Image: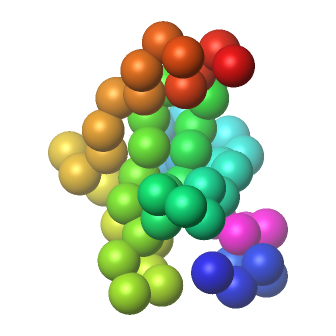
Amino acid sequence: MDHRLLEIVACPVCHGKLYYNKEQQELICKPDGLAYPVQDGIPVLLEVEARALTLEESHP
């Protein structure tokens, strides 16, 4: 994922910073406990497409 893109994208729910998980190809919003998929290098920033983080993922 392009780091320049990561600097400008924000969580669509809280407008907070997203963190990229390269292994799972997801953008993570810890405050909301959501993981947005990245498909073919394109973030899918739709709340309905996000998965809920597990307790371990949201509080490592």
Instruction: Locate residue 60 relative to residue 12 in the image: left or right.
Output: right
Query: Looking at the image, which residue sits at the far front?
Result: 23
16 relative to 4 in the view: left or right: left
Residue 14, placed above or below residue 5: above
The reply to whether residue 45 is visible in this rendering is no
Spot occupied by residue 17 in the image (x, y as percentages of width and height): 72, 46
Residue closest to the eye, 15 or 21: 21
Q: Quadrant of residue 1?
A: bottom right
Looking at the image, residue 51 sits to the left or right of residue 22; the answer is left
Residue lying at 55% horizontally and 61% vertically, measured from the top left: 23
Vertical order, 59 against 43 (above or below) = above
The dominant secondary structure in magenta is: helix
Residue beneath the point at 68% across and 40% down: 16
**In the image, residue 9 lies in the stretch drawn in magenta:** yes
The magenta segment: 6-10
Q: Residue at x 79, y 68 (%)?
A: 7
Give percent across and percent down for residue 12: 47, 48
